[in-house]
Structures are given as C-alpha cells and as structure tokens.
Amino acid sequence: MAPDIARILERGRLIVAIPDGTAPPFLERAEDWRRGTDVALAQEIAAAFGAALALDPRADGVAGVIDRVMRREADLGLGGIAIDLERAKRVRFSRPYAVLEEALLANRARLSQTDAPDPLAALNRADATIALRADHPEAALRSLLPEAAIRRYAHWAPDMVEAVSRGEVAAALGDEVEIGQALRAAPDAPLRLRALTIPALRQSLAVVLPWDSIQLARWLDLFLERAGAPMSLNQLVRRYGRSEEHN
C-alpha cells in the first residue's frame, strides 16, 4: 500500500486543515459548531476513505492552511482555496471541486466620470486604481486591465469594499460570493456599487495536499470526479450547504 494512504489508515483519522475564521458558504461557525460546504465535503471524503474526520481549524487563513499541509501537519487542506501557480510550487492540488466566476465591484460614480465606450474601458486607464487582495495573483487582472494601477489590501471586507465605496479605488476584484455579499450588505449598496462580470476570469477551488501525496491525490481526483466535480457555486451549495461538524 502506498505510504501516503497507509499513514492515514493506520492513524484512523483524516486530518483536514481549515482556516481559523469564516468564509461563507465554504466555512461558517456558530458557537462550537463549524459548518459550510467545505466542512460537508471533508466529511464525505473521510467517510468514503474509511477514516474518521479530524478538522484542524488552527491555520491562520489560507496561507496557514498551505503551510500546515506543506509541513505534513495535515493530510488535506480545504476552505475555498483557489489554485494558483505560486501555491502550486509548495503543495499539490486536486482536480477542481468548484469553479467560481470572478467580477469587478466598481464604484458607479467613478464609472460615470469618463466617456469610455464600456465599463472595462473606463477602468483600463492610468488614473484608475483596482484593489486586489494581498494573496491573489495579478497576472489575469494585468492582462485584462494593463493600463490600470493595482493596490493591494489585506482583506476583501471591510478593506476593499470600503475602498470602492469611498472612491479610493475605482473597482475591486472579487469572486461571485464576495461580490454578492457586498451588494447585499446595505440597502443602498446597489445604488453606489456595480458588479462587472468577467467571463474570462474564473477561480478554480481545489483540495490541498502535500506535494508527495501522489496516491492520495489520485484517489481524491477519482472521488471528486464521481461526485460531479467541478461544480458551480449553486451546485456546491445545494449539495454540501447544510452539514455541520462539532468542535
């Protein structure tokens, strides 16, 4: 038996690292319960593998999950983690289990100040600044808006959303979950903010594994294929949106 498989079966527990925090709908918390699509997915993976699930919620954000998996302190990592080239230098990714559409959350007043023929053209200017989360790769955004300036922020909310609302930046790049939350956060938000969907920009979410867990990665890819991956956000929520794990 492959060592990466045998190690888990001998231990009897599948250790899954998740960020210490919430990231709805992937990770949510209520008192001593953790819930969300990725908690439910972890439960299903552990059951199919034949091991008890041990959630490890001590990681400091996505970067912390990557670190814990890279150091083999966890067998897998979950939590709405997107595949990117820098992370793939340190860990292995499964096939995607979900694909999220990305969009720009734009300041309506800033868009109206130019005579550009379309909203993206209005943002592709030297005097337009686009907010980008600190851990998000910028290559795709640079390709889409080569003339715009990029400013990094630590968090989507409240940092980037407030920067767009104040007009500090012209727009912010986020995924469909983040954009939807921003537009629902206040009754007047749709009057001040606008979502610009960009079909060319997508995020693939995947399970993180140690770089040398080759057989486990093959097993996981087969499991996800049979589960119908990759799923849209709506499909993911319909299938995995209700399960809970007690701490």
Image (cartoon, rainbow, N blue to C red):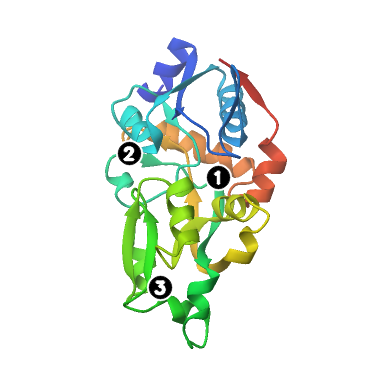
Q: Earlier in the sequence, mark 1 or mark 3?
A: 1
Q: Earlier in the sequence, mark 3 or mark 2?
A: 2
Q: Is residue 174 left or right of residue 29?
A: left
What residue lies at 43% left-to-right and 75% top-to-bottom? 123
Q: Is residue 212 above or below residue 32?
A: below
Element type where label 3 sits in the image: helix
Kind of residue at badge 1: Tyr
**Mark toward the viewer: 1 or 3:** 3
What residue lies at 40% left-to-right and 34% top-to-bottom? 61
Residue under numbered circle 2: 91
- Which numbered circle lies on residue 144? 3
Kind of residue at badge 2: Val
Cα separation between marks 1 and 3: 26 Å
Q: Position of residue 47 (x, y in %)?
A: 61, 22
Q: Nearer the viewer, residue 108 or 239?
A: 108
Label 2: how many residues lie within 10 Å, few (<14), some (14-19) or many (20+)? Answer: some
Residue under numbered circle 1: 97
